[in-house]
Amino acid sequence: DIQMTQSPSTLSASVGDRVTITCRASESISAWLAWYQQKPGKAPKLLIFEASSLESGVPSRFSGSGSGTEFTLTITSLQPDDFATYYCQQYYVFWTFGQGTKVEIK
Amino acid sequence: QVQLVESGGGVVQPGRSLRLSCAASGFTFSDHAMHWVRQAPGKGLEWVAVISYDGSNQEYRDSVKGRFTISRDNSNNTLFVQMNSLRTEDTAVYYCARDKAEGSDPFDIWGQGTLVTVSS
């Protein structure tokens, strides 16, 4: 099974900050990686697919990069609506999620 | 609008069964593979099962193989999961989710989730 490891687990940031979350795969997954945002009590929302493609309707302050085993999600100029938990997901072999990164208010 | 609505959750004793449903609307249901994903209280997301667009293929995570069965009714735009021999560790919010394309893709539409509690 492919394992996904996110870092950090929790991130404290302020509105306007640039935020970066890292996701590492236990083996190469090419660019078959997605990022999701989840708010408490709500379903996850797809943000990024194929490592760097922005899902329709997602603000351009979200971006993704990476390939192989290392990936990043970057939020430029963090907005109040962005405080949430973020998950990476590989879909190279079945589907596996990272453990999540909670972005909280500093 | 594009929507998935789950139903069927509840409290069930260990060893018993439960069937969840997911009603789809606003898109051509039969064009997409569909998934079940779960989230235990306070925990992360865990993929459970997938079914191909026409129902001919299914895959499961190891921990539910032989106990859960995913199925679909394309004439009624509904996805199901039959959960047998339930365990306390199956307690979670269960989401149905649409595969972005043909079955090897991320999930672009999610339902609101339905809570399954397995407890004596």
Image (cartoon, grey):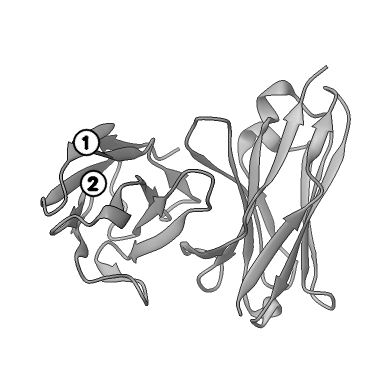
Mark 2 lies on residue = A69
Marks 2 & 1 on one chain: yes
Classify A60 as above or below B68.
Answer: below
Q: Callout 1, which amino acid?
A: Leu
**Residue B98 percent coordinates (x, y):** 58, 66
Mark 1 lies on residue = A11
Specify whether residue B69 is in view.
yes
Residue at horizontal 31 percent and vertical 39 percent from the top: A101
Q: Is residue A2 left or right of residue B57?
A: left
Element on which disc 1 rests: strand
Question: Given this view, does label 2 or label 1 mark the residue nearer the observer?
Answer: 1
Element on which disc 2 rests: loop
**Residue A53 percent coordinates (x, y):** 28, 71
For the residue pair A85 and A31, the one nearer the viewer reads as A85
Q: Callout 2, which amino acid?
A: Thr
Q: Residues within 10 Å of mark 1 (few under 14, many from 20)?
A: some
**Residue B97 percent coordinates (x, y):** 59, 60
Residue at horizontal 39 percent and vertical 54 percent from the top: A36
The mark found on residue A21 in the picture is none
Q: Residues within 10 Å of mark 2 (few under 14, many from 20)?
A: some
Q: Is residue A28 left or right of residue B4?
A: left
